[in-house]
Each structure stands twice: as C-alpha cells, then as structure tokens.
Image (cartoon, coloured by chain):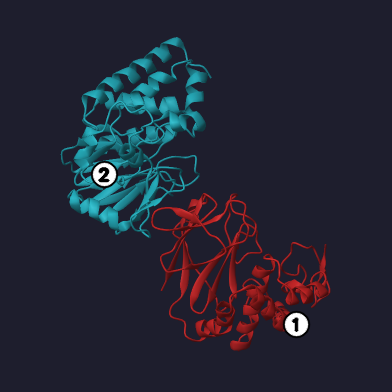
Chain colours: A red, B cyan
Amino acid sequence: MTWKCPICGYENSDDALFCMQCGAKKPENVKTEPPAVQQEANQQPPISAQPSAEPQAQQVQAQEQSSQPVVVTEQSNQQLTSEGQSSVQTSVKQPIEQSVQQTSQTPSQSVSVGSATQQALQTPAGKYYLIFIATPVSALNKTKLPLEFDVFESISIGRSPENVIVIPDPEISRRHAIISLEGGKLYIEDLNSTNGTYLYDGKLFQPVKGKQELAPGSIIKLGSNTILKIVIE
Amino acid sequence: MALSESEINEILKIINEAHDFFISEPLLLELPEKDTVAFVGDTHGALDVTEEVFRELYDKVDILIFLGDYVDRGSQGIENLTLILRKMLENPKKVIVLRGNHESPLTNEFYGFKGEVLEKMGDYYEDFVNMFSAMPYAAIINGYFCVHGGIARNLEDVKQINSLRRPDVNPDDEIAFEMLWNDPREELEGFVPNVRGEGTYFYGKDVTLKFLERNNLKGIIRGHEAVDAFRFEMDNRVITVFSSRYHGLGAGALVLNKGSFCKVLL
C-alpha cells in the first residue's frame, strides 16, 4: 500500500519511512486509515502500536522545546523545511498519541516522557556514543558514533539505509532496534528483529525484552556478529 | 592440480619431521633475547608473502616468529605451510612456528585446507592433523608474549601452557582453545563472549594489563584478526599483525629492533 506525502504529494511505497521525492518523514498514523488511530485511542491498543506512537510523541516534544528545526543529515534546506512542516502536521496528532501511551503504560512512565526529553535537551550531562566492538565489516571496529538526540528523537539501527545508524551485517534486520533518550536515561528496544537484540549482563548476552534501560558501558549485541558498546563523554 | 608422488612424499616427510620436532619442544617456547625479531601474522596460503619474508627479511633479522594460520582461505596452503616448516627444520633456532586456530580440523573442514589436501595429495589430511596437534601455542621473546589469539580466562601464569595436554587435535582444552581464538578489545573490561562462537572471548584492557604484570611481560604480539597489516592497542601493549592477501588489505611483518618496532609491508 502506498502513502501520499503531505508535503509534495508524491506517492511513496509503504516501506519508505521518508518521502522519496522531498525527504519528508512519513506521517505514521495518517498513512492508511486515520479513523483507526482514533479507535485505538479509546481502546487498549495493540502492542505493535507502541513503538511508533512513543517516538512520535517524543519528537513533538523535542520540536516544541528546541528552537532549532529538526536537522536530518544528508538532506537539503528545502527538505529541512519540509521536515519541520511534517512535524507540525503530526503534532496535531499529539493528544491522541499521548492517550494511546497512557492507556497502554503505567502512568509514571508516560508522564515522564515530556519532562525527560526536556531535561535531556536543556542540560545534557554528556554525549552518548556507540563504539563498534565487532562487526563483519572489520574496518568499522573501533568506530565511535555520536548518538545525536538533539537531531534525532530516537536512533534507529538496522541494515537498510533509512535508519539513523546503518550496519552492513546480513544478520541484522532492515529495522533492527531503536535507542531512545527519556528523562536522561537511555533505552533500547528490539524492533522484532529476526536475530534478536541482546544486552550483556556481565556473564551472558541476554535477549532484550520490551524497552530496556542502557547505561554507559552497556554492551549490546545485534544478531550474532555485531557488538556495540555505549559510552558517555 | 594434483602433486606428483615424489612431491607428496617430500611433503609428508617434512610434515612428519616437523611433528617429531614439535614433540621434542615445550608448548611454550621461552626464547633467548635477540636484537632483531620479525613477527609474521596469518598468511593463510599467501605463498608470495611467505616467500618475500624469507627473501627480504630472513637475513636481516636474528629470529622469525610465525604467529599461526598458514592454511585455509587460500589455494596454496600446502605450499605455504611446507615452505615455513622446511625453513624451520633447516634452522629451528631462527624460525619459530606457532599454532593458529586454522591448524585444526575445526576450521580446515570449512575453509578449504582439508579439500586442498584431498585434491592435491589424496587421503593424507590426517598426517597434517597429527602434526598440528603437536604445535606450540606460544613463545616469549624479549618480554613479549607471542600467540595467535591472545590470553585465556583461566591462564594465570604462562607456565601453565607447558602442562596443557598434547596432542590436542581441535584443541579441546579451554586454555589452549582460547589462546588460539580470543581477540583483544581495549574498549572492554574482563572477558566478554566473542562473536566467533561458543567458547571464544574478547579480552579487555584490565585483564590484559593484569596478565602482563603478573607474568612480567611487556606486551602481546598476535595475529588472528584481518586488520590492515597492523593494529596497535592498549597503549601499544597489544599488537596485531596480519600478513595475508585474502582480506584485500595490507600484509605486514613487524620487526622489533633493539626495543623499537618497525612496520614492514609485504
């Protein structure tokens, strides 16, 4: 099923997360049947609604807090504007997203989302980085990547180019995992990947279930060949 | 291409003599101090690299240390291995040959050497296995611990190496296995499970420095990882040397000359 870009009107394929024509982000819940989202808000939502709902709510917060527009690397100014516009459009959906979240999660968690993002943006205690410990492309080992939460509301990791961090490892799913910052705390969530996301507990790599907190020094494994470490500087 | 009967017999003679030589030596070779030492990492059938080492470096150094992985991943594993062993037998004080994780049926089954032996020589693979299972795991020279992979979780004292069992075909001993399979990672602490499979580990900076201190060593010189000829880490306490062609990056030999390191590209 295709989705029509709200900015330029281009018909994009369903798996494209950004408009192929202008680069605007796919407005997630507008894509197919908007009424379905309304319904979800009133009912217990399916679990699959959460991953998309949460980051989006967060993005809206980030937009409001920071005076800068969302900057997406490798995109032109024009596209930046489109990005901003599309975010404004999605912000209309915000109340719905919030309520989806609140019904599905413990109150304390959902309340913390707004203030958390705010804190992280205003008083960063340091910058988080990902270091490649092992991956099939050995030239990537020791590479240190900043987790730019002031640019991306959440950092998606996967094999396909639409991700914030792209890892060329055949065992990694196209969209494999997502790292987010909430309340100054870092979280990782597996996106139902084929080969799994694991967190080292000091002895073994344990599968990540749901959203799990990361700390500086956390060691993450994606599939069986890629290991990453979180550091803060 | 199949080898002639006389060539096969010559190779088998070298393999058997090398086996008997290895058995007569300890599993940890504690070598006398030398002014100039050359270290050669994984060659993996890169016969041209090995030939260049003997042509260009051999006369200029006091001792040559091969860090393992002579076969698999290349079509001239037999030729590469026999050249190294022949040189070792000619001058065993000058050519030191250590075992790598590819001197084992665990890898030869999947990376080509078993097939190469069958194709070029016939049913003689077991002769190689027999010789591999007697090879030394490590050497110490000028305060450097030379080993294919690195340190092992249960290796406290280097002297333990001499009491490891022999022959050990795969090897199955945990310490021996890890010395051939583990990788250093300065970003980590302790031993963390490696992506190479069950029983393999990354060794972090803290455990490496402790091991070196406990054994009064300056550093570790090893191969095993397909780096662009060299990788220095943990403040130059761990040096990876890679000397093959298959990975498409640089092939190098490391020369230790009166305490300072010199990189030689092959």
Q: CA distance from mark 1 to mark 2?
A: 61 Å
The amino acid type of the residue labelled 1 equals: Gln
Q: Tell me what residue is drawn at x 39 percent, y 39 percent.
A: B42
Q: Position of residue B109 (x, y in %)?
A: 49, 29
Chain containing mark 2: B
Position above or below: B59 against A46: above
**Residue B63: quarter of image:** top left
Quadrant the N terminus of chain A occupies:
bottom right
Task: Identify which amino acid the numbered label 2 is placed on.
Answer: Leu
Nearest the camera: B30 or A40? A40
Q: Is residue B125 above or below residue B58?
A: above
Give neighbour class at mark 1: few <14, some 14-19, many 20+ (Cα, 10 Å): some
Q: Secondary structure at mark 1?
A: helix
Instruction: Name the residue located 48 percent from the left edge and 78 percent from the top edge.
Output: A184
Chain of the residue where label 1 is placed in the rendered structure:
A
Where residue B90 appears, x then y in whole percent?
26, 23
| Residue A89: mark | 1
Q: Which mark is residue B155?
A: 2
| Apparent side of residue B105 relative to residue B61 in the rendered image (left or right) | right
Question: Which numbered dot is residue A196?
Answer: none
